[in-house]
Amino acid sequence: MAEEDDTKIRILQSLRGKICEAKNLGPNSGPTRLRDVSTFCTISLDQEEVFRTKVFEKTLSPFYGEDFYFEIPRPFQCLSFYVYSKSVFQRDLPVGKVSIRKEDLCKISGRENWFTLQPVDPNSQVQGKVHLEMRLNELITENGSLGQQLSVRIIACQGLPLISGQNCDPYATVTLVGPARSDQKKTKVKKKTSDPQFEETFYFEVTRSSNYKRSQFQVEEEDIEKLSIKVDLWNNGNLAQDVFLGETRVSLKILKSNHIHRAWYLLLPKGNGNKTKVDDLGSLRLNVTYTEDTVLPSACYAPLRTLLMKSPDVKTYCECEKALQLPCIGTCAVNENASTPGRSKTVCPISASAAHILGDVCRDQNEAMLPVVRLLLHHNRLLPFVSAIAELELEHTQEANTIFRGNTLATRCIDDMMKIVGRSYLMVTLKSVLDEICDSNKSCEIDPIKLKEGDNVEANKENLQGYVQKVFSSITQSSASCPPLMCDVFRSLRQMASKRFPADPHVQYSAVSSFVFLRFFAVAVLTPHTFQLRPHHPDPEISRTLTLISKTIQTLGSWGSLSKTKLSSFKETYMYDFFKSFQEDQCIEKVKKFLDDISSNVSKESSGLEDSLVLKEGEVHKRAQGRKRLGKKNFKKRWLRVTNRELSYHKHRGKEALFVISVKSILGVEKVDESAFNRKNMFQVIHSEKPLYVQAGNCVEASEWIEVLSQVSRCNPERLSTYHPSAYVTGTWLCCRAPYETQPGCKPCTMSMPVNIQLDIDCDRETERIFSMLTANMPKLQKMEDACASLSVYLGQQKEQEEYSLFTIQDPKETFGTIQLIRTVLEELQAHHETHGALADEPGSMENPIVGKTS
């Protein structure tokens, strides 16, 4: 499978960010002025909604605080954020929107911005593209003179929007427009499709005969360059008004006689220069990061990947070998414990490795180290790398009570590792208790200043203490569920901390608790939505409760924090009083035992939790299996759930399974043609019985379901090589008209890329991101190289200290050599990009449509 994928170029798009808050929503005057309304916000790719916040009650300045991340599975023109007012008795009403064209996303990427809400105009709600063929033909007129005729063939459209949740009934108008003419023709209506095939040709006379007198005609021969073809797409409303779907305009300047011009064009909003002044609708604060990765064939990344994989290695060589100038990657320090008597060994420290250099030159380590962690994790090389960079940090830590407290390369890598491998651990440890806290929503405020009228502080304290005890017990009893890699890292940290501060008996515990309590559990409690423990950002009251619980858990988990000296450091009197209730030896012993269990040398038996890891679940529409006819009644709402053991669907979330499919029996997972059931975003799970047909809520959801099911079943030995993209209805397959239900498929199955399904790691994509970051930071890489040169015996005079103090350079010579290797592999990879870029889709292809003009 991997060999077949090695020739494929992938364009992968992703979107992440936060819908922060809105202010002053709605018109500030007039009959439509908003008062005490509930609002929510949505994200749409063109006109398809792919994300929705929870409803925020009765405020015109809501704080949404909703993080989002998703892969973008299809081409799009515009990213839009809509604010809606929630109505009980009628459809939700749009307040306003923020629309950002794809080409403008890079201008706002990665930082928060306030955007003014614009009115929602139906004529601007467009998506899709149209395929046109145009040609200028010479013809003989009736009087025998020579003239020109324009033929316009409207071939097809793709990706037209849904109308009221259903496929539209589209038709097109084709108009020849110019200074003194406007000739319009119309296609037939295509029923119930977002991808209509028109295949209609229209003819327009564009010039008079060659021997006419110019004074006799309004349109002169040279005016042909002022003519253009305008194509409008409409949804046939039958008895209602037709709905505008988009337009494009193509100038006849691009045409040459007897030359065929064929291209795809994006549909654009209706051009209207008469913008009327509207009321201020408020504003929306957003943080949006759009990423587009051009992932080359896997072989192109082999040199860079190999260089990065060497980062965890601690290479050794003898002084006599060094005298022979044998190569070594890394900086060198004397190893006092040489294994060979009489020969001094040296080792190359981690600071000269490619991965560490990446962290040095990329100051935003949050972005830089995540792909490195993923890559090393996939290849089982993360533990030695993390141990090496943590040991380097410990060398510069002067006091035991500040161990691993900063935002450093080591802490960043361990944070990322815990978030990736600890996902299921958090789920089984915290989800049920957090659900209880958020759903019951008992008052827990203990700050006298923030108490509401009628609140009882003692009752609130009792509620808070009950919640803290449940969270604390759930954590301290969860050691058997801690992933083995996390245990290995904690054990390494514990040993290194004890060696660095041998006089402090508690440092071995604080080295571990600073991660597992402060950076893992406490953060997950504070923001459960970012760890997929809750679907949305909690409201302010619940958020306050979670903040108090998180602060308590941090202090309970910090080794030695239950001593009286620690209690005296609390600034808030109410927190001091509250923590007195936890002054018990048994709390200290529970924390100590938990830290011992997750960082000891004792081999931990598998708890079996990984075997039942939930990969994805959500609400879908499922077609009843075995139905022979089409119809809306065949589709029912169901809760779909997939683990790496089985796929099941349920009537509602939490209910018993109505049907279970073993992952081992899945033979294929593929998209379903829209025409099969007149529904978008459908996929099928092919297994030993009838195919399971499922409709997802949107294109993002459909892509995620297909991806996770394909990956979890990709190693099944009986996977099919072909499939039917449509359905078997009334005794025939709609796609190929084969009469038998058991007939082999008529289309090759999609080959899935080999990734780690539980960790969701695509190594080629991660390496491409590392390449992009190194390329973007080439000036800093050059400064680091210059610093190494000035510090070594190589070149030039030594520069001032500040020239190289920003970098970790222990051995300039070896670091210089690694940078040279990085430069070489970057140049090779850049050449691959240029070669493949030359083969990219030409403008006007289906994948790269032309942005035309509007009227």
Image (cartoon, rainbow, N blue to C red):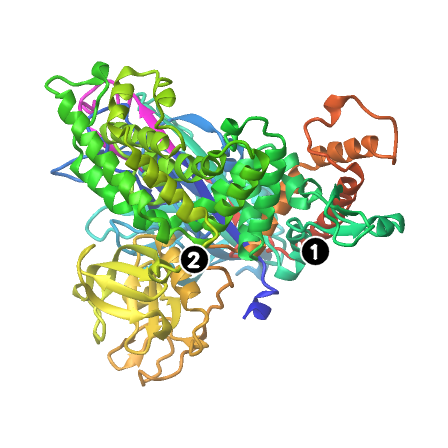
Left or right of 322 in this view: 762: left
Q: Nearer the viewer, residue 826 or 61?
A: 826
At label 1, counting other C-alpha atoms closer than 10 Å, the crowd grade (few under 14, some 14-19, many 20 or more) is some
Q: Quadrant of the C terminus?
A: top left
Q: Which residues are magenta?
A: 19-41
Q: Helix or strand or loop: what does disc 1 sit on?
A: helix
Left or right of 830 in this view: 655: left
Residue 499 visible (yes or no): yes
Query: Total label count?
Result: 2
Q: Amino acid at mark 1?
A: Pro
- The circle drawn on residue 268 is none
Q: Are marks 1 and 2 in contact (CB under 8 Å)?
A: no
Q: Helix or strand or loop: what does disc 2 sit on?
A: loop
**Residue 440 place in picture, x, y as percent:** 16, 37
Q: From the viewer's perspective, is residue 62 above or below residue 229?
A: above
Q: Amino acid at mark 2?
A: Gln
Residue at 21% x, 48% y: name it: 240
- Which residue position is annotated with label 1? 303
For discs 1 and 2, the disc positioned in front in the rendered view? 2
- Which residue position is annotated with label 2? 758
Q: Quadrant of the N terminus?
A: bottom right
Q: Nearer the viewer, residue 162 or 691?
A: 691
